[in-house]
Image (cartoon, rainbow, N blue to C red):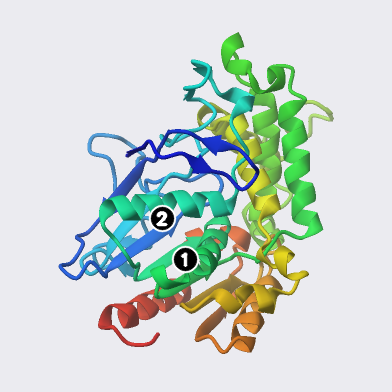
């Protein structure tokens, strides 16, 4: 959907015109009160569920969660997935043409924040004629957006579902993001972010960024169970500093290679910066309880015991701040071995918990 009304950005920039790519699932009811907005994380998109006809491997990134008869049941809810500004899956981003110059934005695309994404999503809902959402839901960076929705537009959602997320990034997380960004910007093919004009892609930097990120998404238990110290070629050691010796090395290189083929380098820089900047408590002298006082929605928060990137303690911070504000909060800490990626996987306890919560939302009662 195209928008001509300028969008002022938190960092001082302005998008004079932009496009948001989105998909919907299910039907909006007559009362227009069964809509659920799904917010995506770093490398996902608006393609939340289902498959594209005739396209292999086109499954939506949360297809196990959303669809007919699934925890977020699209026979009851009207689900909306939106690709965020600055991304590389259809919405206006660095790969698009800057109308002010007639050239591709590249590194000139303005910095965007979680709050900017929420503003743009709200405009999309206005265009769809949806005044209030039954729920906003997301995991990781998507959970930050759900939390921000509850603060920016407290009257426009009844429930916020925040999964494997945090009220801000700690220093360790910012450090991981910075190392990944440096891998990209120091790639000789980056060309200061204007690599499109040179007909190249900084694939080496993207590969390293993805390899680093992927390590943080997995738990030590998962990596040891799946790979351990298994060698790539049986029992034979090559005694090489350059070649692949261990299966975990092969796996990470494979993930990096895949990522470098479909993801945009400038988008990676933008989205990791949005992660770094998100901190609703900053304007309240770092008092999260004061920051969350604006929220009026009911909350479901979920964390996973082996998620060390967005540890359960970060979810508990949000729970405590919401309880201090006398908000209705449900919280679950799932004992799962999968690390941060658990929010995307098929843990039966996790899926049953979300199903039960949305069944209560659908019934119109307090969850």
Residue 326 lies, with reference to residue 107, above or below; the image says below
Q: How far is disc 2 from disc 1 in space, using C-alphas?
A: 8 Å
Q: Quadrant of the N terminus?
A: top left
Pinpoint residue 223: horizontal percent, then vertical percent: 67, 54
Looking at the image, can residue 319 be seen?
Answer: yes
Q: Quadrant of the C terminus?
A: bottom left
Considering depth in this image, is 142 or 121 the residue closer to the camera? 121
Q: Residue 35 falls in which quadrant of the image?
A: bottom left
Neighbour class for label 2 at 10 Å: few (<14), some, many (≥20)?
some
Q: Residue at x 64, y 54 (%)?
A: 217
Left or right of 80, for residue 217 = right
Between discs 2 and 1, the one toward the N terminus: 2
Residue 159 lies, with reference to residue 277, above or below; the image says below
Circles 2 and 1 in contact, beta carbons < 8 Å = yes
Neighbour class for label 1 at 10 Å: few (<14), some, many (≥20)?
some
Q: Residue at x 56, y 47 (%)?
A: 42
- Please name the residue that numbered disc 2 is placed on: 122
Q: Residue at x 27, y 69 (%)?
A: 34
Residue 25 lies, with reference to residue 89, above or below; the image says below
Q: Name the element at disc 1.
A: loop
Pinpoint residue 199: horizontal percent, then vertical percent: 57, 11
Left or right of 13, for residue 28 = left
Considering depth in this image, is 250 or 308 the residue closer to the camera? 308
Left or right of 359, for residue 174 = right
Considering depth in this image, is 354 or 118 the residue closer to the camera? 118
- Please name the residue that numbered disc 1 is placed on: 153
Looking at the image, can residue 343 be seen?
Answer: no
């Amino acid at each position: 959907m195209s928008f001509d009304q300028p969008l002022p950005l938190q960092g001082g920039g302005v998008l004079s015109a932009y496009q948001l790519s989105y998909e919907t699932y299910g039907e909006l009811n007559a009362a227009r009160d069964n809509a659920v907005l799904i917010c995506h994380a770093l490398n996902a998109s608006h393609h939340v569920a289902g498959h594209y006809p005739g396209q292999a491997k086109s499954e939506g990134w949360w297809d196990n969660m959303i669809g007919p008869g699934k925890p977020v049941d699209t026979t009851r809810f009207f689900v909306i997935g939106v690709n965020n500004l600055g991304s590389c899956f259809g919405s206006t981003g660095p790969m698009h043409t800057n109308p002010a110059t007639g050239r591709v934005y590249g590194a000139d695309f303005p910095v965007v924040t979680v709050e900017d994404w929420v503003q743009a999503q709200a405009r999309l809902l206005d265009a769809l004629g949806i005044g209030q959402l039954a729920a906003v839901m997301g995991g990781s960076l998507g959970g930050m957006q759900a939390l921000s929705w509850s603060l920016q537009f407290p009257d426009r959602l009844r429930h916020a579902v925040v999964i494997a997320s945090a009220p801000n990034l700690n220093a360790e997380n910012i450090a991981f993001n910075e190392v990944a960004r440096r891998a990209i910007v120091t790639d000789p093919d980056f060309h200061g972010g204007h690599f499109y004009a040179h007909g190249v892609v900084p694939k080496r930097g993207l590969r390293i960024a993805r390899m680093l990120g992927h390590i943080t998404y997995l738990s030590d238990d998962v990596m040891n169970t799946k790979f351990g110290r298994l060698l790539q070629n049986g029992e034979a050691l090559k005694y090489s500093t350059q070649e692949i010796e261990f299966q975990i090395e092969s796996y990470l290189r494979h993930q990096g290679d895949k990522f470098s083929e479909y993801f945009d380098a400038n988008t990676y820089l933008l989205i990791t910066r949005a992660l770094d900047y998100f901190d609703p408590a900053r304007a309240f002298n770092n008092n999260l309880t004061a920051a969350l006082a604006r929220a009026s929605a009911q909350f479901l928060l979920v964390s996973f015991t082996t998620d060390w990137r967005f540890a359960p303690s970060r979810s508990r911070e949000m729970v405590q701040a919401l309880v201090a504000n006398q908000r209705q909060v449900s919280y679950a800490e799932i004992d799962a071995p999968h690390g941060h990626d658990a929010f995307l996987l098929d843990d039966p306890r996790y899926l049953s918990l979300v199903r039960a919560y949305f069944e209560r939302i659908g019934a119109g009662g307090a969850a």
